[in-house]
Image (cartoon, rainbow, N blue to C red):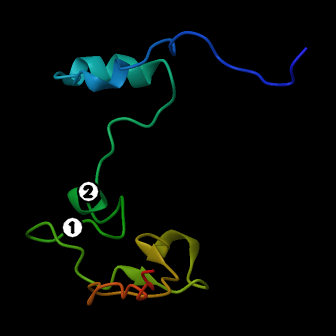
C-alpha cells in the first residue's frame, strides 16, 4: 500500500459566501446562532459615557487614537502601543535579480 493520500470530490458548502446576504435580517440570524458580535457599532458613533471616542458635534475621534501600553484600562481603545503611525509612504524596494 502507498503512503500517499488524496481527497476525492469537492468541498461541502463551497461557494456559500459568494452570494451576498443583501438584508440585515439574514446577517442577524447568521450571527444569532453564533455569538454576540453583530452589529458592530463604531466608537465614534456612541456617546462619551459609552466609549472614549464618543461624543462631539460631528463624528471624529477628537484626540490621538494611539494610546500608551501602560494607560488605564478604560482608555485602551484604538491603536494600543502602536509601533508606527501615519501614512505609509514610499514603495517596497525590490532586490535586483540576476538573469542568466
Question: What's the residue at 44%, 69% (across, down)?
Answer: 77
Question: In the drawing, what numbered circle is on residue 38?
Answer: none
As drawn, the residue found furthest toward the left would be 57
User: Relative to 45, is 29 on the left or the right?
Assistant: right
Question: What is the C-alpha distance between the residues marked 2 and 1?
Answer: 7 Å
Q: Name the residue under label 1.
A: 55
**Which residue lies at the image location 8% right of the left edge and 70% below the top edge?**
57
Disc 1 crowd, CA 10 A, few/some/many (<14, 14-19, 20+): some
Where is residue 7? Give x, y as percent.
65, 17
* Residue in the picture at 30% in, 87% down: 86
Q: Could you say which quadrant of the image residue 87 lies in?
A: bottom left
**Where residue 79 sits: x, y (%)?**
43, 75
Q: Is mark 2 on a helix, strand or loop?
A: loop
Look at mark 2 in the image and give the residue it sits on: 46
Give residue 44's quadrant in the image: bottom left
Q: Is residue 3 above or below residue 85?
A: above
Count numbered badges in the picture. Answer: 2
Cβ–Cβ under 8 Å for marks 2 and 1: yes
Give the side of residue 31 with respect to residue 8, left or right: left
Closer-to-camera residue (24/74): 24
Who is closer to the viewer here, 82 or 56? 82
On-image quarter of the N terminus: top right
How far across and down, in percent of the image, does residue 32 sit? 43, 21
- In the displayed structure, 96 sits above or below 76; it is below
Amino acid at each position: 500500500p502507498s503512503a500517499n493520500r488524496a481527497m476525492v470530490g469537492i468541498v461541502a458548502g463551497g461557494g456559500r459566501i459568494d452570494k451576498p446576504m443583501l438584508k440585515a435580517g439574514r446577517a442577524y440570524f447568521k450571527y444569532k446562532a453564533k455569538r454576540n458580535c453583530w452589529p458592530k457599532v463604531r466608537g465614534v458613533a456612541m456617546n462619551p459615557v459609552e466609549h472614549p471616542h464618543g461624543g462631539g458635534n460631528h463624528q471624529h475621534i477628537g484626540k490621538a487614537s494611539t494610546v500608551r501600553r501602560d494607560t488605564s484600562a478604560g482608555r485602551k481603545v484604538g491603536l494600543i502601543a502602536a509601533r508606527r503611525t501615519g501614512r505609509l509612504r514610499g514603495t517596497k524596494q525590490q532586490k535586483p535579480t540576476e538573469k542568466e
